[in-house]
Amino acid sequence: MKTPNVRRAATILRRGGLVAFPTETVYGLGADALNPEAVCRIFEVKKRPRFDPLIVHVASPEQAAALWDRMDPAALRLIQKFWPGPLTIVLPKSSMVPDIVTAGLPTVAVRMPAHPVALDLIRALGRPIAAPSANLFGRTSPTTAADVREDLGSKVDLVLDGGPCRVGVESTVVAIEKGRGFLLRPGGISLEDLRKVLPMASNISLPRRQAGDRRRFAPGFLKSHYAPRTPMVLVNGARSFFKKNTDARIGFLSHPKDLRKAASNLFQAIRKLDKMKLDLIAVERVPARGIGLAIMDRLKKACGGKAGRKTAERMLNNAARRKNRAKK
Ligand code: TXA
Ligand code: MG
C-alpha cells in the first residue's frame, strides 16, 4: 500500500533529504541511515548535540540483523514478542552503520515501528531510516503532523501525516549484555512485560562499561528534557491547594485513570497548556507501573526535576515577582 506521498518521501530520502513520518509512538525525523551527510542534517535541523545517538528504524528483523555485529539470542526473544512495536534494542553495531548515527558508540539502537506508513516508507526506500523524535532538541516530542510543522516547519523536506500517534510516548530502549536487559529509557513497552521475556536490571541502569558517563550516550538521562517553556512542577492535589492561594495563572494537568490513554494524551496536553501563557503548570503524578513508569519519566524531565508544594509555591512567588517587575 504505497501511497504517492510515501513514494515521494522515499525519493527525497534517497537523495539525502529529510522526511518527518508517523510511528505508533511519536513522529520521527528521518534520513537514510546509511548516508552520513543526510544523517548529519538531522543533527543540524534538530539542534541536537552530536553526542546523542539516533535510533535506526527497520521493516524486518533481518534488516536489523544486518546492522548488528551478530544476532543475540536474548534480542531474538524480545523481537519475537514485541516487534513491530515500541521497543528499541541496543547491541554492538556492524561496520555497515556510519559512526555519526551512533555518535561514535560501538553499539546501535534499532527498532521496527508498528505503523503502516513508517513500514511502507522503510520498504519503499529499501534501506533503514535513522530518526529521532521530530522536535527541537530538549522539547516535547510531536504526536501529530501539526506539531512537527510547528517545531521544524520548512526545515524538513516533507511531513507525512499519519494522524495522531497511538502510544504517545517514545519507545522503551533496552541494551542487552550477556543475556540480560538494561533499561535505558522507559517507554511504550513496560518493564513488567519485558521481565516476562528477559532478566532485566532492576532499576533504570546501564551496562557497567557505559555507566561512566550517562550523559554522553543516553541523553534520556539529562535532567531537563521534553520540556515546555512554561515553568512546570510535579505536585499532587494542586488544584484545591492553589485555588484560594493566588491570582497567578496556573494550569493543572491531571491524567485519565487509564494509563494508556494518559500516555497517548500526554504530549498534546503539555503542548496545549504551554501555549496558554500561564505562570505555572502543576502536574499530577501517576502510579509508576506499566506505561506509568514512562509517563513519570517524561513528567519529571518536563519539570526539570522540580516537585512538591514548597517548590511549587516558590515558583509561583517568582512568577509573581517577575510580573510585578514587568508592570513597573
Ligand atoms: O519512539 C521512539 O523511540 C521515537 C520514534 C521516532 O521512533 N524516537 C526517539 O528517538 O525517541 P530519540 O532520538 O528522541 O531518542 C533516542 C534515545 C536517546 O535517549 C538516545 O540516547 C538513545 O535512544 N540511544 C540511541 N542510540 C543509543 C545507543 N547506541 N546506546 C544507548 N542509547 C542510545
Ligand atoms: Mg527525543
Image: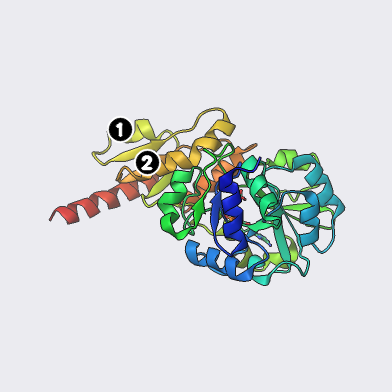
Foreground residue, 322 or 27? 27
Q: Residue at 35% x, 39% y: name it.
A: 251
Residue 276: % across, % down: 31, 42
Residue 130: % across, % down: 63, 59
> Is 83 left, or right, of 230 in this rendering?
right
**In the depicted structure, whether residue 37 falls above or below residue 140:** below
Q: Where is residue 64, by image quadrant?
A: bottom right
User: Badge 2 local density, few (<14 within 10 Å), some, or many (20+)?
Assistant: some
**In the depicted structure, whether residue 49 falls above or below residue 21:** below
Residue furthest right as drawn: 73
> Is 125 left, or right, of 46 in this rendering?
right
Residue 243 circle label: 1
Secondary structure of the residue carrying tag 2 is: helix
**In the depicted structure, whether residue 98 falls above or below residue 311:** below
Quick one: label 2 or label 1, which is nearer the N terminus? 1
**In the depicted structure, whether residue 17 falls above or below residue 319:** below
Q: Where is residue 117, by image quadrant?
A: top right
Q: Amino acid at mark 2?
A: Leu
Q: Residue at 74% x, 43% y: name it.
A: 83
User: Badge 1 local density, few (<14 within 10 Å), some, or many (20+)?
Assistant: few
Q: Quadrant of the C terminus?
A: bottom left
Residue 67: % across, % down: 76, 61
- The answer, for residue 194, to whether it is visible in the render is yes
> Is 88 left, or right, of 288 in this rendering?
right
Foreground residue, 34 or 200? 34
Q: Amino acid at mark 1?
A: Lys
Q: Which residue is mark 2?
A: 273
Q: Residue at 46% x, 54% y: name it.
A: 139
Residue 264: % across, % down: 54, 36
